[in-house]
């Protein structure tokens, strides 16, 4: 079994059901669970503005060419401009998305991609459908699209409903570095903790938090860390100095991390797996 | 295995897969040979497996999201639709599009009726009571019609073609662009407005029927009739029928929303919607043909009788296309098998079921 996946680490730490969740969970026919981050109205509006600007630039360039050509053959030039305008307004998004695997220049710049509901690339006819409905979605000021996006869980505008598509964020694929090793920090004394050990996910969250602690000021960092520190102190039945948890929650989290990380790394794998209720789910069944 | 050992052992494969995906996603993807396909498939499985392992252990959220991204990109590239071929486009026009029109014949008929009934009605009414035209068509538009089809028309005499203005030919290319942008735009909008439970589609069809019919009635009552009819008969076949068909496509959407049956309204829209899209695109193509005819054939300086003969044949051609094109042995079945072979994955039935609607 695979634990429910959310892209928001806080929901994992607190195990509360997410109220608004940008995560989209797709189970492929090969039983691989993939998660995507849905793109909200703001990102999509940004991508649209870039596309719109590009369309305007192209149209202006074409109009400039036509203006020059108009001295030779005004009607032919004007006719071609109209054809170009038609192609731009009805086929720009459609053809880019269909031929460039769900991206337009604006979506590419913002890091968005259109995919089908089930995770595979957008098909030609779905791209046509979702972009032809722009004619209705976009009038006035994309208001119908916006209302539709608010009314369903996957931020679909009407065109997305028709084409069975969703727009997802593409994060940059960067292999994370090794976990932070906090050499100078002492583990908590064993006689001060007696409760259930923290989950691996919680440790991973602490690792990430400590790795980025320099991004906020120290008091702010303590403020952010305090709720988790208090919850962990309760879970571990921590009986040591209470001011460590109250006043220096970051330090407490670091010590918890070091305590259990060291234990993790030192123990042989059999005991570790046996002691862990979650098993690796490696059901991958395609040839 | 600890996390660190795991990272050390698996990293090489992940790096390799990053490269493979980058190559597959490049602007001009190269065709992979058998060995590369095997490698792609192996790495996709490896990464999917690693993703499950990392998730199961809850090792690291960033590592998890890294592997998730690798796997989803790989999945996206692996199941990419085979590139479109000229053959597919030809098959769309020779069989897929006419078949879809026959499958949805009721809608197409209703769309045409919503256009042609008000068309003939307002034509007849304006002939009977010419003052009615001013309620429908503004004065400037009437002046334009006077110019185009009146005594001083650049089209010349309809019986012989004498009096045809030479400079007119160059002007027609400008008009061609206008016909493309304007007419096809209207057809696509008529389709898209089907999402308003059909209200927008029906209004557009009725409005266009009434306006165009009124103009015909006006020309008729002013005595421009022969010139206009010989001009319009050829391209009218494709143009007017295509407007009706695009309306039919909009009505498919509308009916999916109004009568969803046992599905929810949005599901019903999805199931019927991609048929409608394909019909609408076909209507757009018919309008492109009409624009060519209207720009270069319809105003040709030849006696009207030829235009009536050719125009009549074009009407028959349109009806024959809708009625007969693409009948015979099923070309679609071949596509499905081809698609299956291309997929290369085990669980194809589910996959195909999902894709069939989107398939050309």
Image: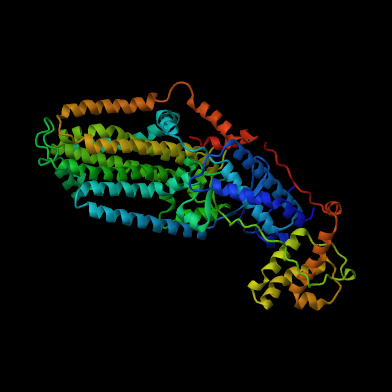
Residue B28 locus on image (x, y percent): 48, 45
Can residue B114 be seen here? The reply is no
The residue shown at (59%, 36%) is B34
> From the viewer's perspective, is A258 left or right of B239?
right
- Say above or below: B216 vs A274: above
> From the viewer's perspective, is A40 left or right of B171?
right
> From the viewer's perspective, is A206 left or right of B300?
right
- List the single residue furthest toward the right: A191
Can residue A54 be seen here? The reply is yes
Residue B176 locus on image (x, y percent): 26, 42
Asked whether B162 or B143 is in front, the reply is B162
The residue shown at (9%, 37%) is B163
Residue B180 locus on image (x, y percent): 30, 43
Asked whether B112 or A74 is in front, the reply is A74
- Where residue A191 sits, quadrant-wise, is bottom right
- Say above or below: B18 vs B149: below
Colour setting: rainbow
- Where residue B127 sits, quadrant-wise, is top left
- List the single residue furthest toward the top: B328
Asked whether B181 or B214 is in front, the reply is B181
Residue B118 locus on image (x, y percent): 30, 37
Q: Quadrant of the C terminus of chain A?
A: top right
């Amino acid at each position: 079994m695979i634990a429910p996946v959310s892209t928001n680490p806080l929901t994992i730490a607190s195990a509360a059901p997410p109220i608004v969740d940008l995560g989209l969970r797709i189970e492929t026919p090969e039983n691989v669970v993939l998660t995507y981050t849905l793109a909200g109205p703001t990102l999509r509006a940004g991508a649209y503005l870039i596309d719109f600007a590009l369309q305007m630039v192209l149209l202006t360039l074409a109009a400039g060419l036509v203006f020059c050509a108009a001295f030779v053959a005004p009607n032919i030039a004007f006719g071609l401009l109209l054809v170009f305008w038609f192609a731009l307004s009805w086929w720009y998004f459609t053809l880019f998305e269909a031929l460039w695997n769900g991206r337009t220049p604006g979506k590419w710049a913002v890091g968005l991609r259109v995919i089908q509901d089930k995770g595979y690339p957008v098909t030609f006819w779905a791209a046509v459908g979702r972009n032809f409905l722009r004619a209705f979605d976009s009038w006035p000021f994309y208001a119908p699209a916006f209302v539709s996006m608010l009314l369903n869980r996957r931020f679909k505008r009407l065109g997305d409903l028709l084409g069975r598509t969703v727009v997802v964020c593409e994060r940059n694929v960067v292999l994370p570095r090794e976990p932070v090793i906090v050499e100078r920090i002492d583990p908590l004394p064993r006689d001060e903790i007696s409760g259930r050990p923290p989950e691996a996910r919680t440790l991973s969250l602490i690792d990430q938090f400590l790795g980025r602690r320099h991004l906020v000021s120290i008091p702010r960092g303590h403020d952010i860390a305090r709720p988790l520190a208090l919850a962990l102190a309760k879970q571990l039945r921590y009986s040591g100095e209470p001011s460590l948890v109250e006043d220096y929650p970051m330090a407490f989290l670091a010590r918890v991390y070091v305590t259990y990380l060291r234990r993790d790394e030192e123990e042989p794998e059999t005991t570790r797996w046996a002691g862990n209720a979650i098993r690796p789910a490696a059901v991958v069944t395609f040839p | 295995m600890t996390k660190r050992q795991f990272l050390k052992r698996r990293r090489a494969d992940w790096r390799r897969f990053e490269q493979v995906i980058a190559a597959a996603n490049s602007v001009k993807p190269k065709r992979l040979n058998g060995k590369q396909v095997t490698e792609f498939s192996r790495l996709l499985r490896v990464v999917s497996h690693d993703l499950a392992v990392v998730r199961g252990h809850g090792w690291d959220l960033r590592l998890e999201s890294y592997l998730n991204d690798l796997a989803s990109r790989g999945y996206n590239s692996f199941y990419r639709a085979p590139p479109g071929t000229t053959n597919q486009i030809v098959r769309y026009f020779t069989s897929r599009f006419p078949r879809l029109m026959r499958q949805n014949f009721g809608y197409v008929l209703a769309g045409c009726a919503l256009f042609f009934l008000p068309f003939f009605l307002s034509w007849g009414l304006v002939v009977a009571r010419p003052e009615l035209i001013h309620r429908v068509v503004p004065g400037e538009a009437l002046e334009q019609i006077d110019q185009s089809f009146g005594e001083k028309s650049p089209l010349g005499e309809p019986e012989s073609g004498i009096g045809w203005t030479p400079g007119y030919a160059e002007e027609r290319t400008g008009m061609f662009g206008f016909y493309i942008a304007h007419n096809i735009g209207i057809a696509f909008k008529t389709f898209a407005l089907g999402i308003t439970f059909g209200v927008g589609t029906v209004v557009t069809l009725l409005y266009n029927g009434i306006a165009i019919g009124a103009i015909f009635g006006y020309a008729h009552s002013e005595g421009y009739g022969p010139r206009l009819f010989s001009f319009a008969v050829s391209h009218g076949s494709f143009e007017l029928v295509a407007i009706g068909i695009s309306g039919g496509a909009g009505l498919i959407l509308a009916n999916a929303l109004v009568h969803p049956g046992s599905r929810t309204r949005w599901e019903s829209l999805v199931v019927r919607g991609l048929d409608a899209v394909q019909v609408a695109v076909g209507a757009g193509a018919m309008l492109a043909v009409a624009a060519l005819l209207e720009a270069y054939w319809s105003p040709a300086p030849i006696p009207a009788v030829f235009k009536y003969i050719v125009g009549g044949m074009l009407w028959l051609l349109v009806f024959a296309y809708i009625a007969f094109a693409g009948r015979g042995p099923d070309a679609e079945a071949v596509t499905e098998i081809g698609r299956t072979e291309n997929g290369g994955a085990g669980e194809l039935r589910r996959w195909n079921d999902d894709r069939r609607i989107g398939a050309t």
